[in-house]
Image (cartoon, rainbow, N blue to C red):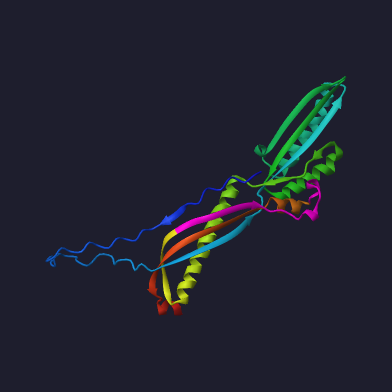
Amino acid sequence: MALPVPPPARVFAELLPTPAPASAPAGGGGGGGGGGGPPAPSGREVHVSGSAELSAGPDRARVSLRLGSRKGAAGAARSSVSRRLEYIAQSARQRGVTEENMTVTEDFSRVEDTYQMEAEVCIIFSDFGKMQNVCNLLIEKLGTSVTISPPHFYHTPEAVDTLRRQVCVAAVGNTRRKAQEVCRLFGQSLGKPLLIREEETKEWRGHIDNHLSNSPDSLTLQERIQNATAYASCRVFAVFEIKGKENRRNKLL
């Protein structure tokens, strides 16, 4: 499943400096509160950029199970498939799979002088350990009468959004730490942010080397998870105010 297109670059915060108070009119020295306004900004700034890269493994897996039966009597064909469908559903429920995560489709047809019943069960797992337990059990109990496809791993939209937020916050944190180190190098104290802008975001999926496997169907479970892992990077640009000389007491603490 392709990742949703990331939003365009945007400004997260821009705090404009407070304008200097207007000068008092000539001869107006008696007004109360004169000279009590906020000091004009120093105009000293540090401009830095920072980046971060994070990854997130898939949080869902979809497994499809196919089974069928061809009999001379319609009831016999239906009954053969229905018994296996019930066993599959019961085994999944006993291991914590809810009904909304199981979908069953059935197809009944007549082929020459016989009746054919086919069914497919699609199960969504959020716990990959439970997925393996269910699949192993069904292979053991049902054998070749059921065909289980390799699991398809993917991310929910919520997981992708979380990854995007985390990588952006991490990039902003790295940028602020870089600005702090620059200020400390010159004995200055870092002030408030004046501008934080997301410059670039990239997203891609993990991939394994081609020499590991020639066919997607022969990938191991860990190779499939690695192949479905989502990566995201973010670069931000920030402008911080330089407050002045660093407080020696805070520096000692």
Instruction: Check the picture and name the quadrant holding the N terminus.
Output: top right
**Magenta residues, start to end:** 196-219
- For image coordinates 80% across by 42% down, the residue present is 138
Report the front residue among 112 and 215: 215
Number of callouts in the render? 0
* Image spot of residue 135 (x, y percent): 78, 44
* Image spot of residue 59 (x, y percent): 65, 49
11 to the left or right of 55: left
In the rendered view, would you say 207 is above or below 178? above
91 to the left or right of 159: right
Instruction: Specify whether residue 171 is painted magenta.
Output: no
The image quarter containing residue 97 is top right
- For image coordinates 80% across by 52% down, the residue present is 213
* Image spot of residue 102 (x, y percent): 69, 37
Report the front residue among 5 and 221: 5
- For image coordinates 53% across by 60% down, the residue present is 171
In the rendered view, would you say 216 is above or below 35? above
- For image coordinates 47% across by 76% down, the residue present is 185
Report the front residue among 74 and 66: 66
* Image spot of residue 108 (x, y percent): 78, 24
183 to the left or right of 125: left
Report the front residue among 65 and 214: 214
Instruction: Check the picture and name the quadrant holding the C terminus.
Output: bottom left
43 to the left or right of 157: left
In the rendered view, would you say 206 is above or below 141? below
Instruction: Specify whether residue 215 is painted magenta.
Output: yes
